[in-house]
Amino acid sequence: MDFEEAADALYAAPAADFIATRNELAKQLKADGDQLGSTRLKAMRKPTVAAWVTNLVARQRPDDLDDLLALGDEFREATADLDGERLRELTPKRHKLLDKLAKSAAELAAKEGQKVSADVAQKLRETLDAALVDPAAGDAVREGRLSSALRHVGFGVVDESGEPTNVTPLTDERRQKARERRKAETAAEEEKEESAAERRKREKAEQEQEEREAAAKAEAKKAFEAAVTAAQEAEATVEDLDNQLDEAREALAEAQELVRRLGAELDDARRAARDAQKESREARKRYNRL
């Protein structure tokens, strides 16, 4: 089992078993020689109820989820084309599909013994709507490994009826010409206003920024590697202490057995001494009578 398979199995587990499942899978990855995967898996967060139900939908209703994401593509196309009529047509489909998925999610959760409260249902719907709006959110939902619910702030600039507002419709040709004109005007202004010294200053600043970013990345990588090393050392310490504890327990058991055995031998010796003393008294009595 590799890390991806372990992560999928982890988020497919019942919510109540998340921690135990994570520990067991991390242990298995470590046993398979994937220390980095084991450490990454241990860092994964337990999903909220809304996130867990969303993951359940992604696994058991993938076709319905794909329909939702495809509808999101249609919304983005209509928004880019400033097609208010198309947006009004798509909006009822959006609500209908969200209702269908939310109902399916509640049914799936009930089969798993998980009750969906009004708050969870609202967060679930917001998460599904975010998946429709944002392709990145859609990919995250489809992956089925959410740890928290998602939200969005809407599609572009539209009025209450779904009609684009404060924009001017443009053909593709006019859009391209406008872009080229702005680009040419910007380049001319920059060439006019920017002296050689200013250009060198800007280039130096850009270089310094790149160097800072490179240093930050190197530092982040170093910190991550140090964290992995620390985790490995901590796990090794835990294993060593476990071994010492087992040895101490074995030694204690052996000592307890020795005490029990010596106690029994002492009891036997005391009985033998009492018997000998009794025999000695009887012998003295017989001697006196003689």
Image (cartoon, helix red, strand yellow):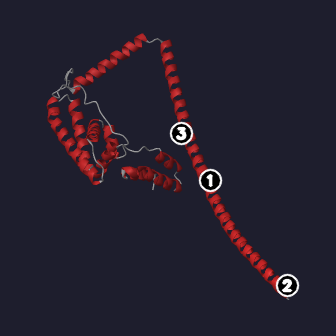
Question: Quick one: label 1 or label 3, which is nearer the N terminus?
Answer: 3
Q: At x 24% / y 38%, what residue is drawn?
A: 72
Quadrant position of residue 140: top left
The amino acid marked with disc number 1 is Asp
Q: At x 51% / y 16%, what residue is drawn?
A: 201
Q: Is the N terminus in the top left, top right, bottom left or bottom right quadrant?
A: bottom left
Q: What x and y, as percent, mark residue 216?
A: 53, 30
Q: Is the C terminus in the top left, top right, bottom left or bottom right quadrant?
A: bottom right
**Closer to the eye: label 2 or 3:** 2
Q: Is residue 206 left or right of residue 265?
A: left
User: What residue would you read off at disc 1?
Assistant: 240
Q: What x and y, as percent, mark residue 240?
A: 62, 53
What label does residue 288 carry, if any? 2
User: What residue would you read off at disc 3?
Assistant: 224
Q: At x 25% / y 28%, what residue is drawn?
A: 156
Which one is nearer the viewer's eye here, 224 or 126? 126
CA separation, marks 1 and 3?
Answer: 24 Å
Question: Quick one: label 2 or label 1, which is nearer the N terminus?
Answer: 1
Which one is nearer the viewer's eye here, 139 or 289? 289
Element at label 2: helix
CA separation, marks 2 and 1?
Answer: 71 Å
